[in-house]
Amino acid sequence: MPDLSRDDFAVLAAQAGFRPDDPHLDELYRDVVGMLARLPIIEAVANGETEPAPAPGQGV
Amino acid sequence: MADASLTQGTLAGLAALIRAKKVSPVEVVEAHIARIEALEPRLNAFITRTFDAARATAKQAEAEIAAGGYRGPLHGVPIAFKDLYWTKGVRTTSGSTVTGDFVPDEDATVVRLLAEAGAVSLGKTNMVEYAYGGTEHNEAYGPPCNPWDTGRITGGSSSGSAAAVASGEAAMALGSDTAGSIRGPASLCGLVGHKPTYGLVSRHGASPLSWSQDHVGPLTRTVEDAALTLDVIAGHDPLDPASADAPRVDYASALAGGVKGMRIGVPSNHVWASTHPEVRAAFEAALAVLEGEGASVEWVEVPGLDEISAAQVTITLAEATAFHRERIRQHPEMFHPGVRRRIETGLFLPAHAYVQAQRVRSWMEGNWAQAFSRFDLLATPTTPLAAPPFGASAVDSADGPVTTREIVRLTRLFNPNGLPACSVPCGFSGEGMPFGLQLVGRRFDDALVLRAAHAYEQAAGWHTRRPAL
């Protein structure tokens, strides 16, 4: 989900139950963009046949 | 008149005095209550004090021991619990006013086990709200202060537990650790903090942050004290779905033997991107001590550290938001702003990202296996900096600023795969603030981790220092 625009975020936020005029949304938008920017690092590895490990010691 | 010297030793030392009947649990508990009453206006380590119950338990312990019913090293020893452990009939706030009136109707398994061992609870310690953060103040109950300098943070989230033990208010306090919340505060307060292997200690009755990454463990003044505590709290619990039926180990007895012949790997990647030069110097001096004790040390690239760090954050976002979803919708204004934003950010995490983070956890198993095929232990600094002043977002160093948000960068690496990790004091900054050495082992090799930490501790001697309060 690259480059989430402020307008697209507003749509998602409304679906999540936030009021459009919530002053807190601008700060939250920055955090969400930051979170999404970190995802490529986990998407670049553990592909192919690797199964998820819901807890330590599981998966592989 | 309470004997203040009783608050300055170790859990093991107190146990020896109590067992030999040189001091009674009543005297020990009264000394700690006096210490708490004297220091709390400056430290704010406790949310709830349970002195009446403590006095009654101490009297019972005194009578039992006098009658020959000594239960073991925790009998009559004053301890405290991070305020996310359920305590029957005693409020358990998890550091939040949202659940500030929650009074459990049962004890957490670890609370029960420690009570059965005869430990005396002095109360519930302050913490970062819902354990979700490494540095935030607690706005609802006030920030715990670092006993080494009350103008500085203790680190979190087991902040009050660290302040209580470092100041001599309790001989041991339980913390919990999802990204470093035992080890970080231990490092910043000059204590030992052990995060046991995932599944070794029951999480039943510990309010969760991230089910698959939460660990229960002690903060103590010495490694021996941590081992004595682990001897009580480790074991299979059918009430915890993640609890392992691992072979019973006597951790305190396994401390002897030193590090001669042990192979210690030091990650050459990830760790050093933003670590204060004072911490690095102390860490390298600690490695020299370990080598002097007969260990071999080798720097090595451990693949996947950047990825597992990102996976830890992603898994926490998903699981913490799942747990707090209703609370954050109903009472968003009651949360600390930083905690609130983290929980709300998780509402926007794509589902595939959570699963992908779990795949990274699976993938990382191979990298850990490769590392531990060559080494018995891995070593890093515990925190990349010493405790910063309240409100500081960065600390200056000769290599440039080190940001305080980095505090859990080196500890969170070992939570997704549940590896045992112990922080032991390894030096002090130029401003007199402590920091720790982190030793990490294979799953269920807690005894080896503690043995190496004990050998280092005894050779280096940092654990004998106490803050001047």
Image: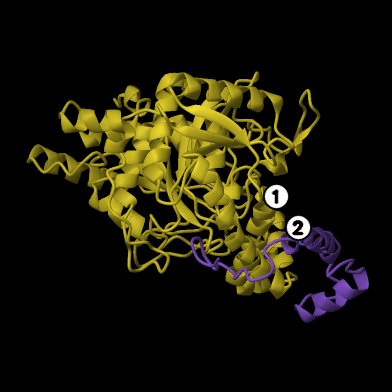
Chain colours: A purple, B yellow
Q: Residue, x 50% and y 45% (percent of image)?
A: B373
* Quadrant assignment, res A18: bottom right
Graded by Cα atoms within 10 Å as few (under 14), some (14 to 19) or many (20 or more), the crowding at tag 1 reads some
Q: Of A12 and B254, which appears nearest the observer?
A: B254
What type is the residue that disc 2 sits on? Ile
Residue B282 against residue B47 in the figure, above or below: above
Residue B114 at what x, y percent from top left? 30, 50
What type is the residue that disc 1 sits on? Asp
Residue B26 appears left or right of B181: left
Q: Quadrant of the N terminus of chain B?
A: top left
Mark 1 and 2 residues: CB-CB less than 8 Å, in contact? Answer: yes
* Local SS, label 1: helix
Residue B211 appears left or right of A6: left
Q: Residue, x 28% and y 45% (percent of image)?
A: B119
Q: Residue, x 41% and y 63% (percent of image)?
A: B205
Graded by Cα atoms within 10 Å as few (under 14), some (14 to 19) or many (20 or more), the crowding at tag 2 reads some
Q: Residue, x 75% and y 78% (percent of image)?
A: A16
Can see residue B398?
A: yes
Q: Of B332 and B306, which appears nearest the observer?
A: B306
Q: Chain of mark 2?
A: A
What residue sits right under mark 1 in the picture? B306
Q: CA distance from mark 1 to mark 2?
A: 8 Å
* Quadrant assignment, res B383: top right
Q: Chain of mark 1?
A: B
* Local SS, label 2: helix
What residue sits right under mark 2 in the picture? A41
* Quadrant assignment, res B72: top left
Residue B170 at what x, y percent from top left? 39, 37
Q: Of B384 and B309, which appears nearest the observer?
A: B309
